[in-house]
Image: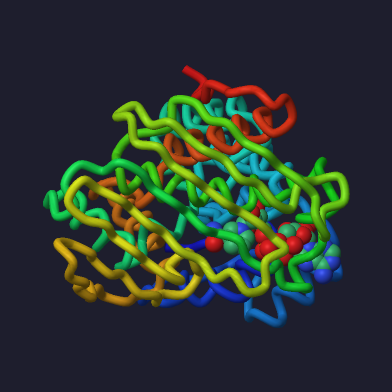
Amino acid sequence: MRWGLIGASQIAAFSMIAALRSFAGDRVISVLSSDPARARDYAALHDIAHAFTDLDQMLADPALDAVYISTTNDRHFAQAMAAIRAGKHVLCEKPLAMSVADAVTMVRAAQEAGLVLATNHHLRNAGSHQAMRDLIRAGRIGEVQSIRVFHAVYLRPELQGWRIDNPAAGGGVVADIATHDADVVRFLLGESPVDLVAMTSARALGKGVEDNAMSIWQMPSGVQVFCHVSFTHPHAGTGLEIHGTEGSIIARNVMTQRPGGTVDLHRGGQVEEVSFGERNLYAHGIGMFRDAVAGQGRPAADGADGVRSLAVAQAMLEAGRTGQRVTVDYGG
Ligand code: NDP
């Protein structure tokens, strides 16, 4: 496939370009930036043939099959809609849009055009997360009662731009991290939160946006989920615990961009280390996207998954703002 990058971003530079190029014959042929010099420099640095500042010009290239959108969150919606109008498949970063209504519009537009729209929720591609889901499905921990997600990290200085001081660009830890956690929980349980309570705060880094949030979600099955996200915790590590009536799954350092971490199964006073395959999380997602474009299967996380993770994040922000328990609005 021939790919265009919408956004001269760090995630593309450090993870996605290499992952896209890991498929024999796939090429990254163009990049778009709002700044001509950055577009040129980025293209030169990453050996990309064409640099654009005009999206329609970039999309007019008939050689282009698909775009990967990784601009700031406020730009995803308009850029995705333009790509869909131009007949390109879209792999879009999370959150898909700034509102659930816009995200739903994206999904419908792609469906009507017969194009693949996927959300780059990488964590469900991890061998660790798939092993955990298999254990749940096999009944190894009995009936799931609760999940605890610890995803409190220290935001690296190079990422402390719009994420910590620009609400208009979609900054804040809820949009950045809690969207991923919503996707993970949905992936593990196969259901989406009904409602939630939350408290958000700006402890150290956030200026006009939250940098810390704790929330409790109620699932349709009755499972309760506790989720802690933060940009300000250098030493917390990440973790995921799934507690059932007959056992618990305790995973550490699995909420990461790279494969790894540990998964332990606790049952009857014994602890079993669970083995799982390690692979590039992003490349795995791209592989499923390519298959979906070829008419085989669905993307790892599709547009509807992106709508739902965004809806949970929006509910969390509203609950934090109002102090009320909020029903998650998935947009119909
Ligand atoms: P960046 O800040 O690196 O890039 C976002 C935009 O900021 C770019 O499109 C670019 O605009 C602009 N920009 C980049 N570098 C500079 C610079 N030096 N000076 C001025 N502007 C600059 O963001 P990230 O790569 O961290 O995140 C991009 C998107 O990807 C977000 O939606 C985020 O949520 C998502 N993301 C997803 C991850 C995942 O694992 N799925 C991980 C990390 C991010 P322009 O293109 O106009 O030049």
Report the front residue among 58 and 239: 239
For the N terminus, which image quadrant? bottom left
Residue 190 visible, this angle:
yes
Q: Residue 297 location, x and y as percent? A: 24, 47
Locate residue 10: give its quadrant.
bottom right
Q: Residue 273 location, x and y as percent? A: 23, 75
**Left or right of 131 on screen, residue 124:** right
Q: Residue 267 location, x and y as percent? A: 17, 62
Residue at 45%, 39% (x, y): give it. Answer: 303
Report the front residue among 253 and 90: 253
Residue at 29%, 55% (x, y): give it. Answer: 291
Report the front residue among 56 and 303: 303
Residue at 72%, 25% (x, y): give it. Answer: 322
| Mark count | 0
The way the protein has been coloured in the rendering is rainbow
Residue farthest along the top direction in this orientation: 332
Residue farthest along the front direction in this orientation: 269
Report the front residue among 162 and 29: 162
Residue at 21%, 51% (x, y): give it. Answer: 136
124 in relation to 216, above or below: below
Residue 65 visible, this angle:
no
**Left or right of 224 on screen, residue 221:** left
Q: Residue 59 location, x and y as percent? A: 62, 49
54 in relation to 11, above or below: above
